[in-house]
Image (cartoon, rainbow, N blue to C red):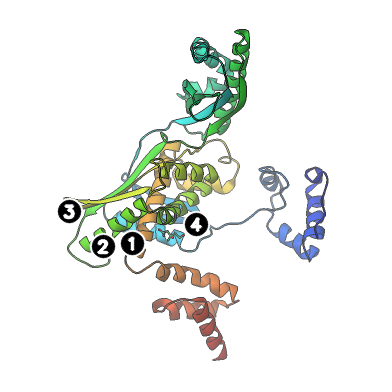
Amino acid sequence: MQKTVEGFSKLSKQEKIHWIAHNCTSDPESTKKTLAHYCNENEALQKVHDEFIENTLTNYYLPFAVAPNFLINGTLYTIPMTIEESSVVAAASKAAKFWLTRSGFKTTVLGTEKVGQVHFMYYGNKQSIETLIKDILPTFYIATEAITRNMKKRGGGITNIALRDKTNVLEGYYQLHCTFETLDAMGANFINSCLEQFAKTLKEEASKKDIELEIIMSILSNYVPNCVVRAEVSCPISEDRSEETVSRNFAQRFVQAVSIAKSEPYRAVTHNKGIMNGIDAVVLATGNDFRAVEAGVHAYAAKDGSYSSLTHAEIKAGIFRFWMDVPLALGTVGGLTSLHPLVKLALEILQSPSAKDLMQIVAVAGLAQNFAALRSLVTTGIQKGHMKMHLLNMLNQMGASDEEKKQLVEYFKERTVSNASVKEHLERLRKL
Ligand code: MEV
């Protein structure tokens, strides 16, 4: 039974570790060793990591990998990916190579608009609130000048402030629906600071006119349907049915698989999860907020009223085309970008992208991942490649030596991998 604790956040890091080790684990000395093992030797750097969040005990490791050979709008990229799932990087690399010889990926940023809202309740006459907002519109901009000055100098800032009457969905509910251009920053702090100032201004100006309203909250929206990038690939259909071509049969099965994901939410969720394998891995490697991206992407996938595939595919005039429009609010400055050494490295590997460049790269990683998954699903099935990649995890779990791993990877090259078969063959090998 664990104990409650008062003022945990005020304890020193060592005191916290001591408390956890002695109250939550069966072997306190081993816990302390594990936590110490994953701390960085560079104390100053570790302190920076400790201060990312509260109550940090150590660092949590995930693999940092790269998928090379991505040709995007004629430029070659090696894409950094942070993910624990064994087959994702291999699948991305395979898809990159496949499209490398077919003119690569094409991308276009369709919009970069970020959104934030001030939610408030007002039960008076609609005309009065409309007039108030119209009259005080310049005041919103003036009151936020200190916040927006730098962003404006670089070409960004507040792009619109509009009153929205939401009383049809909730009695008395209005909002200031605001849009922003935040350039290379993800912009969450900038947007939220502007919104909180708008709320303050609104309250002050309303009370000057004896208009009663109640501010409920001011917050950015992670739903960014106008901050969207398109990624696509296309190639002629080949009459050759070999594995290395896009044959008519393969293309037709592929288009059917996408159509199924478009019309069937159970399938769409898994289909889009595969896309997020690629998207999240790059979002995480580049220090962006993957929860924001996830929330926004899935809302976008349901924008037409039911949850559907993010990708589209067609065969027209002998050309196979596969594409995706996806909302991505990303940043390449601010946040962790200059603080986390691996984020800095990831951005350097990506040739110091702007936020727009990063949107395109991330979308490509998602499209590539979906291509790789569907390619397996409509041909060999997913388990062949998946279990091959998972084999090393299984062997590590079973405590296999390097030599045993080598022999069993060779043995399973042409055989079906399952937990039972791997166990059986490892035991057989050990008896030889
Ligand atoms: C597994 O992480 C992702 C897949 O399930 C995606 C899909 O089914 O399209 C393979």
Residues at marks 4 and 1 touching, judged by CB atoms closer than 8 Å: no
- Specify few, some or many for label 1: CA neighbours under 10 Å numbering under 14, 14-19, or 20 or more: many
- Choose between 128 and 36: the one closer to the eye: 128
Residues at marks 3 and 4 touching, judged by CB atoms closer than 8 Å: no
Of pointers 4 and 1, the one earlier in the residue sequence: 4
In whole angstroms, how far apart are the C-alphas of marks 3 and 2? 13 Å
In whole angstroms, how far apart are the C-alphas of marks 4 and 2? 30 Å
Residue at the disc numbered 1 = 375
Residue at the disc numbered 3 = 318
For numbered disc 1, what is the local secondary structure? Answer: helix
Indicate the position of residue 102 as horizontal and vertical percent values: 26, 54
Of pointers 4 and 2, the one earlier in the residue sequence: 4
Of pointers 3 and 2, the one earlier in the residue sequence: 2
In whole angstroms, how far apart are the C-alphas of marks 4 and 1? 22 Å
Residue at the disc numbered 4 = 65
x 60%, y 24%: residue:
196
Q: Is residue 213 above or below residue 23?
A: above
For numbered disc 3, what is the local secondary structure? Answer: loop
Depth check, mark 3 against mark 4: the one in front is 3
